[in-house]
Image: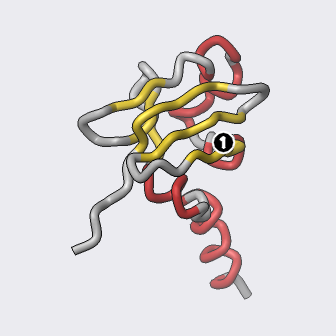
Amino acid sequence: MRRMVRIQAVKPLEQFNVRLEFTDGTQKEIDLEPYLHGPIFKPIRNDPVMFRSVKVDFRMGTIYWDNGADIDPDVLYHGLQPAWMAAVEVSEARSP
């Protein structure tokens, strides 16, 4: 059985970039801007101090902010498309 990879360290960088360390030792620098959409992320996008307050939830293995916003570690590890973007593509595919 393959073990799930989780985040064990986060360091905010410039703009919306972070350096993440995963439980398998992988380190990645990721631009979180594409993931920071929707009402819960608005204060994070608008306040650099709040963005830089990002933390690791060691129980869930993800990153989060004090307002309850978080991002799935699998999405970040595998570079998957943000959910809002996938929803837009589905909506556009269905429109005539």
Residue 82 placed where, x, y %? 59, 57
2 vs 82: above or below: below
Numbered disc total: 1
Q: How is the model colour-coded?
A: secondary structure
**Percent x, y for residue 73?**
44, 50
Relative placement, left or right, of 53 versus 29 is left
In front here: 31 or 28? 28
Query: Quick one: quadrant of the N terminus?
Result: bottom left
Q: Residue furthest right?
A: 15
Residue drawn 70% across and 17% down?
48
Counting from the top left corner in percent of width and height, residue 24 is at: 41, 53
Quarter where residue 47 is shown: top right
Q: Residues within 10 Å of mark 1 (few under 14, many from 20)?
A: some
Q: Is residue 41 left or right of residue 74?
A: right
Q: Residue at x 34, y 42 (%)?
A: 61
In the depicted structure, whether residue 76 falls above or below residue 86: above
Q: In the rendered view, would you say 93 is above or below 4? A: below
- Horizontal side of 62 relative to 77 (left or right) equals left
Q: Name the quarter where the C terminus is drawn.
A: bottom right
